[in-house]
Amino acid sequence: MMTGGSYTTIDTQKVSGSVPSVPDPGHTTVKFAESNLQTFPPSATQGKISGGSNPPRDADDTFSGNGNGSSDEPQSGGWLHKFTVGAYKPFFDVDTSDVVDRLKESLFPFRGTFTEKTADKPDLYGPFWICTTLIFVAASIGTFVTYVAHKWKKQEWNYDINLVTWSAGVFYGYVTLVPLALYVVLKYFSAPSGLVQLFCLYGYSLFIFIPALCLSVVPVEIFRWVIAGVAGFMSATFVALNLKAHINSAGERSILIIASIFLLQLGLAVVLKLYLFTVTV
C-alpha cells in the first residue's frame, strides 16, 4: 500500500482475490443464453392452482362458455336431467314469428298440418302464455260481466277471487294432464308420440277460447252458447285432425282414441260455457 499526498492507493498486484482491470475495447457485445421465456406459460410447468397450461376459469362460466354453447360443467344425465331448468330451455327458445304462425295455424283446424310444421321444433312458450292469458281474460271478462249485470239490476256486487284460481286449475290442469294421459295411451297401443309435441298441440288448441271469452260479453244467452260451441268444435277438430295420421298406426282402436279426443275437447267447451260464459245474478 502506498500513500501519496492526501490520497491512499492500493497495489492491486499484491492484494489477494482482486480482479484485474479490463481494458476498454470500445465496443462490448453482450450475448444472452437461450431460454424458454418467450413461451408463456411453459408447457412443462404445472402450477399448484391451475394444474395446467390453460388460464384459470371464471367462477361463473355463464359468460365464458364455449362458442358452441357448451360449458365445461358436467351435465347431469339420466332421468334426473328432466328436473333441471336446462332440460326445458330449448323448448322456450322460439321466435315471435314462429309463435304467430302457429297461432294462425290453430285458427284453421281443417288443415291438419300443425304437427308436421312443429315436428322438428315444438315449443312450450306459446302454450304457457296462451294458458296464462286465458286465466286473466277469463277472470277479467267474468268479473266485468257480472259487475255490469249486478249494476243493471241495482244489486250489490262482490268480487269473486275463486274465479282466478278456478281458471288456473282448469287451463293449466287440462293442458298438462290430458296430453300426459294421451301420451301413456299412445305408448300402450304402440303409437308413441313426443310428450312435448302433445303439450304444444294442446296448448295452441286453446287459443281459440281467448276471442270466444271476449265475445261472451254480449248479454245474449243463445249467442254465448253458439260462441262456446263453435270454439269447442274448432278446438276439437284441430286436435283430432292433427293426431289422426299418427294415431292410425294404433290399428282398430284408432277411431275410438280419436273420438275420445274430440269429445273430451268438446267437454272442455261445455265446462267453460257453464262456469265462465254464464252470468248469474
Image: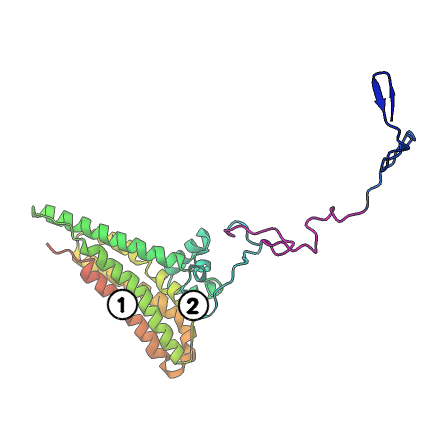
Vertical arrangement, residue 99 with respect to residue 195, above or below: above
Residue 260 coordinates in the image, percent (x, y): 30, 74
Residue 217 coordinates in the image, percent (x, y): 21, 51
The Cα atoms of the two marked residues, 2 and 1, are separated by 36 Å
Residue identifier under label 2? 80
**Marking on residue 172:** none
The picture quadrant where one finds residue 257 is bottom left
Q: Is residue 198 left or right of residue 170?
A: right
Residue 139 coordinates in the image, percent (x, y): 23, 53
The local secondary structure at tag 1 comes to helix
Region rendered in magenta: 34-61
Q: Observer-nearest residue: 258 or 190?
A: 190
Q: Does the magenta stretch include residue 47?
A: yes
Residue occupying the point 27% across, 52% down: 136
Which of discs 2 and 1 lies nearer the camera? The answer is 2
The picture quadrant where one finds residue 6 is top right
Q: Can residue 231 be seen in this view?
A: no
- Residue type highlighted by circle 1: Leu
- Residue type highlighted by circle 2: Leu
Vertical arrangement, residue 185 with respect to residue 160, above or below: below
Residue identifier under label 1? 266
Display colour scheme: rainbow
- Please, which residue is most extreme toward the top here? 5
Which of marks 1 and 2 precedes in the sequence?
A: 2
Check disc 2: other Cα within 10 Å, few if <14, some if 14-19, many if 20+: few
Q: Quadrant of the N terminus?
A: top right
